[in-house]
Amino acid sequence: MELSFAPKEQSGWRGRGAPRKKVPDDILRVLRHTETTGDVGIIDVRDDTDADIREAKLALRAGARHMGRILRLQHDEEAHQIRFQLAPRSAP
């Protein structure tokens, strides 16, 4: 048996639960746009399945968590839209 030490981010250490989900670059790009402009992102989900909608929400949440931000999300079933924005950063 061999003992070694590594910084936490290089050790492979993870918190409880499943490993973090890989966030697609497109999701991060959209969230960064929302963050810098303050615009609300709108996804039309009229022709999407429930599984597709759930996956989109999970990807947005994972992206916001990856960025260290809080996601505000609204699923408007009547308008067939998902609206999202990142919560503004609070002053330190």
Image: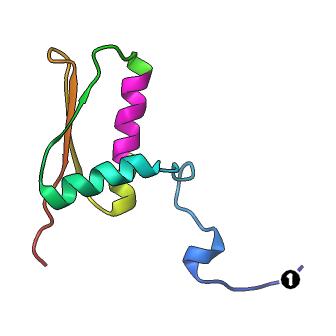
Q: Residue at x 57, y 52 (%)?
A: 19
Q: Position of residue 43 (x, y in %)?
A: 25, 31
Secondary element at image label 1: loop
Q: Tell me: residue 86, above or below residue 54.
A: below
Count of all numbered marks drawn on residues in the image: 1
Q: Position of residue 9 (x, y in %)?
A: 55, 75
Residue 59: which quarter of the image?
top left
Residue most toward the right?
1
Location of the C terminus (image quadrant)? bottom left
Q: Position of residue 36 (x, y in %)?
A: 18, 61
25 or 21: nearer the eye? 25
Q: Residue at x 42, y 24 (%)?
A: 52
Residue 54: which quarter of the image?
top left
Q: Tell me: residue 42, above or below residue 48.
A: below
Q: Is residue 77 magenta?
A: no
Range drawn in magenta: 52-61
Decide if residue 60 is on the left or right side of residue 17: left
1 or 58: nearer the eye? 58
Crowd class of label 1 (few under 14; some 14 to 19; many from 20; radius 10 Å): few
68 or 84: nearer the eye? 84
Q: Residue at x 20, y 58 (%)?
A: 35
- Tell me the chief SS of the magenta region: helix
Decide if residue 49 is on the left or right side of residue 71: right
Location of the N terminus (image quadrant)? bottom right
Q: Tell me: residue 54, above or below residue 7.
A: above
- On the image, numbered disc 1 is attached to which residue? 2
The amino acid marked with disc number 1 is Glu
Q: Position of residue 12 (x, y in %)?
A: 64, 68
Decide if residue 64 is on the left or right side of residue 22: left
Decide if residue 88 is on the left or right side of residue 51: left
